[in-house]
Amino acid sequence: MQAGRDDDALTWDGDDDPTLDVGVASGEGPDRLPAGFTAVGRGSETLAATTDEDAPPDAGSVPRDDVSASAPEPMGNATLITLGVLGGIYALFTIGWLIGGLRLQGSAQYLVTDVMYQGSLWLAVLAPLLWFGTVFLLTRASRAWVRFAWLAAGVVLLLPWPFVMIGAVGQ
């Protein structure tokens, strides 16, 4: 006699997942998987997935072809690592613009008014973050090389020159 899942010591959300049923008490596994599931591992070739014709109609389900066509392709490990490194560079550029701009504040007060300098300082500080976010948002549907080309252009264009020329200590 097979005990039901309600007799288990602990139950969790998702315990009613049909892929968790292992079959009859004799140790045989199921001969079919629910629609949308794919068996992997040892013995997976003996399992057959139910086809869309075999499955009962479900009002909330979407055909598998439509799901795979509309889902974006996930990013690979190298892409994620490169995006993380470039995001770190842009964060350092933000800090560099802030430090360099604050170091120039005393010497630039005789050229422009304080309000104009503060506005341009904060635009310069936010520029690397805005560039990274804008490129990331606008190149979602583009190829990876397009995204990296725009991010590389931003690294060149947004170099924090006040920090590079004066530095954190100054001359």
Image (cartoon, rainbow, N blue to C red):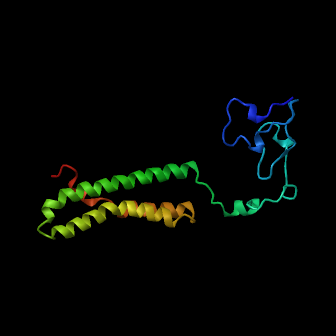
Which residue does the image show at 20% across and 67% down from the upper left? 117
For this orientation, the residue located farthest to the front is 6
Q: Does residue 60 show up?
A: yes
Relative to 116, residue 59 above or below: above
Which residue does the image show at 17% across and 61% down from the upper left? 105
Total marks placed: 0
Relative to 129, residue 21 above or below: above
For this orientation, the residue located farthest to the left is 110
Which residue does the image show at 40% across and 51% down from the upper left? 88
- Quarter location, residue 62: bottom right
Relative to 113, residue 34 above or below: above
Left or right, 109 with respect to 52, comes to: left
- Quarter location, residue 114: bottom left
Q: Residue 133, position in %: x, y?
A: 44, 61
Left or right, 108 with respect to 46, comes to: left
Q: Which of the two residues, 108 or 116, is positioned nearer the viewer here?
A: 116
Q: In what quadrant of the picture does the N terminus appear?
A: top right
Q: Does residue 164 show up?
A: no
Q: Which of the two residues, 166 or 30, is positioned nearer the viewer here?
A: 30
Q: Residue 66, position in %: x, y?
A: 73, 63
Q: Residue 57, position in %: x, y?
A: 82, 60
Q: Which of the two residues, 114 or 86, is positioned nearer the viewer here?
A: 114
Left or right, 148 with respect to 52, comes to: left
Q: Residue 108, position in %: x, y?
A: 15, 65
